[in-house]
Image (cartoon, rainbow, N blue to C red):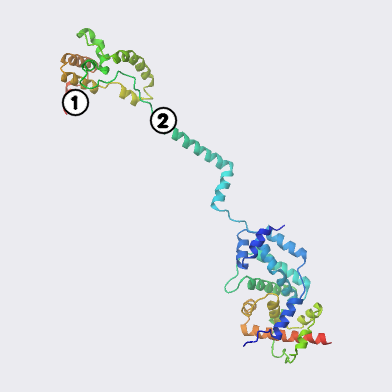
Amino acid sequence: MMDMSAVDNATASSDESLLARYRSGEAPAFDALYQRHRQGLYRFLLGLSGKAEWAEEVYQETWLSLIRSSSQPQGRANFRTWLYQIARNRLIDHWRKHGVRNPLHDSYDEQLHAPVDDANNPEQLLNLSRDSQRLERALQALPADQREVFLLRAHGDLDFAQIATATDTPLETVKSRLRYAQQKLRRLLAEEELT
Amino acid sequence: MTDARPTPEDQVLKHFRDHATGEPPAHLDAFILAAAHREAPVAKPSLWQKWLRACQQPRWQVAFASLVGVALMLTLVQRAPVPEATYDFAPAPKAAGKPEQLRAPAPVARSMAAPAGAMSAPEPAAPMADFAAPQQEAISAERADEAKISKKSTARAAPTLDDQLREVLRLRAVGQSKQAEALMKTLHTRYPNEHLDTRLKALAKP
């Protein structure tokens, strides 16, 4: 059972200080850090891999690697960026191990995959599907690199600069990928709702 | 004025955040948290904690106890001076204004007692001298046993040759030349190898 006072105290701290406290021997600091990021990280991996088994495996590996490592976020990366960067690298390793071609490395012309979005009807926006299966289907219909950026923004709550750092991609590319992903999702969800 | 309303793209983002599902399984949560607690780095103890732990180990306890014991013993030894004997001899002659006491000074009284026959009848000693003589006998015997322990004390209590020579000078100064000569004669007998006259002259110098 977790020490609640220690967790309350840890909740007010930044991710970096929680990690430092854990590394200095304060185990309850990890609980707070884990509670803060467990859902977002899992949803990111689930959305990017598309398979629950892979997501769980990579999710576990990511946290265990953080537990066993003594390294800290380097350079401009904060803890959140660092965590998602570890998870992303683990997933790429996982794909490689299972003989899956890394979809994130596909050369991709975003302009070709971004149809002109003329669906600016507010009525349509209000009727986006709330069905989780449809949401998932629409997400998987996105190209992997757009999906990655969208998931990092939606579930990781990373800003453009952090996404650029985590994915080692130019900032403008990140912005355009996110824009295209959002337009396509809006269109797909609205279309599904209309049908 | 800027339009603060969210763009359609932002609404998609919010829509996904609000309606997304997917939670890590409970067994995974439990496994990861257990691993984190099990493999948490050991906290480095502070200096105070290190010291406290050291104190709890028997070997350090013995070491500290020995140290305290030695320190206590040294303190006791340093604080116990050898008591000075104040009763060994008759009191020293006081000021010159009391001639009856000056005539029979305590340290000399006993040394003069042996050749008493050769001397004229000595003046009666001070009242304390009567008490001091037999007591000195007993204590001198005792001192022989304790010589090793309290050399300093013995040296201070027994009149030295110089003390007795000073006594000769003092007797001469007060006009008791007979007694002074008798004392000198005694000293010559007791210290045949000493150049008493030379030492007497040296002592006479201010």
Q: Residue furthest right?
A: A195
Q: Residue at x 76, y 81 (%)?
A: A139
Of badges 2 and 1, nearer the viewer stands: 2
Quadrant that contains the C terminus of chain A: bottom right
Which residue, given by chain and number where applicable, does mark 2 sit on?
B80
Residue B97 occupies quadrant: top left
Q: Secondary structure at mark 1?
A: helix
Mark 2 chain: B
Question: Image check: A10 left or right of B12?
Answer: left
A122 up-or-down from B46: above or below: below
Q: Return the x and y of residue B149 as percentages of the image width and height.
A: 38, 25
Q: Return the x and y of residue B1 as percentages of the image width and height.
A: 62, 88
Which residue, given by chain and number where applicable, does mark 1 sit on?
B203
- Tell me the kind of residue under disc 1: Leu
Do we see residue A194 in this rendering?
Answer: yes
B102 up-or-down from A86: above or below: above
